[in-house]
Amino acid sequence: MNLKFLMIGIFQCLISSFQTAVGTCTLPNVFRNSVWHDSTRGDLNFTNSTMSGWQTTAYSQSISQWECYIDSHYESNGYLIFKSLQKVTFAGVNFTGYMCMQLTKVTDYSFYYYLLYTQQHNAAEERILYAENATSNVSSICITSSKEPLEQFHVLIKSGYEWEARQYCPTPVLGNFDYTYTGSDGNAYCQNSSDQWRVCSDRQTMTFNYTTCNKIMAYSRGGQVWCVGTVTSSYTFFMVYNNDSSVDGSATFRFTCFSISPDGLKASMVQNNCTENQIPSTFAKRHDGQDMGAKLIMTPYLTCPFTSATPKAENVNVGAVVGGVLGGVVLIVVSVGLYMFYKRNWRMKRSSGQDPRSNVADVKAHNAPDPRTGHGQVKANIMLNLSPREDLKPTNDHSSYENHVPGNECKSPMQSFGSLHVDDYDGQFSPRVIM
């Protein structure tokens, strides 16, 4: 009897654990209640636990609504598993889609990801598991051996933070180039020797000059795109973001993927994401084998690779630079002013007979006879900060010293300069001259 209750308890715990792992899935904070640009699917809208806009077709039926299904492997493996909210029907049976994304953070506002499942030939070659019955087995949804090829990476950028998602363009494209363009239709463009594809002025931005060749590059009418992600194997594959105010999905696209050779002389490009087996010298291919995109032959007339292993940031804060320069100018002006003031004051002290290095004044008593000889001139130095002396004691009216220089026939030098008053404070006194 006790064994029966024990088995029931274990079963209930398993059910509870299953509900906790699967039924209470919430998306990571970075995705909640936000919109993200997907290089392949367009704009994705996230809530706390759902995603919409990631559209696919299975058995001629569309799916675009998904809910968070398992999030327990996100922190360890970057896995986010979604379950479709819409079902597809085949041969009278309803199927639910299960999708496993493996995400890698690029910046605080961008990721790239791969889908981990085998391609489904009856479901638009998508890497999604379709199952009749619910499954919570992660290893059956996320099959790492069936991960998309390296070149087929997808990029996610948070809407409103496109500028912050910029990355340095890869080394083979760090230069200014002349180029020729051959479309998948076989037509060649930009065959002048003065065509301009520039990267050196900003190594995170590629700029195309359409005055020399008006063929649209990187599917951008504005002629400017930002590098946002790079992966490397035998070739370098990198994604750029088109900053045009709008795209039409026909002649212009938000994302373009390049495959470029290590020497930077050949490249192929295609809208959205790179395709399987895409190399720089050939066109990208559709699933049916049809050519797409363009091929490029590049001739550098200037290269600007980084000379250190770690690139230095090129985004200059103009306000901070201007503020620093102005602050430096003000500091110099103040320093010069203080120096001139000190110099002028020093000269004035010298001309008035005062030692500029101390608080000593030369007091001259003109035509006063020397009390020792009865003739001559008396010169006396008075320290403005006198130390108390035992042989000099103040009188009651503080008007003169009792023990002045002997000889009543002669005025004291201090009397010639003025009267010396003494402030008594705890036995210490500091004289001040009152004219």
Image: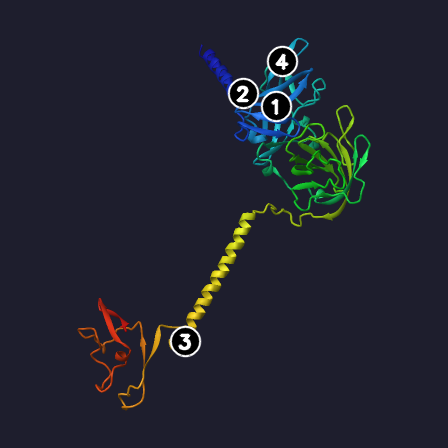
Q: For numbered disc 2, what is the local secondary structure? A: helix
Check the image and report above or below for 40 versus 373: above
Q: Tell which circle, 3 or 4, labels the residue nearer the N-terminal end.
A: 4
Please name the amino acid that badge 4 sits on: Glu
Q: Mark 2 or mark 3: name the one nearer the start of the chain.
A: 2
Label 1 residue SS? strand
Which residue does the numbered mark 4 point to in the structure image? Answer: 132
Q: Which residue has dot 1 on it?
A: 53
Which mark identifies residue 22?
2
According to the image, what is the colour scheme of the structure? rainbow
Q: In the rendered structure, which disc, 3 or 1, sits on the residue that comes first in sequence?
A: 1
Q: Is mark 3 on a helix, strand or loop?
A: helix
Marks 4 and 1 sit apart, C-alpha to C-alpha, by 23 Å
Q: Earlier in the sequence, mark 2 or mark 1?
A: 2
Q: Nearer the viewer, mark 2 or mark 3?
A: 3
Task: Choose between 270 and 260: the one closer to the eye.
Answer: 270
Query: Which is in the foreground here, disc 4 or disc 1?
Result: 1
Residue for badge 3? 350
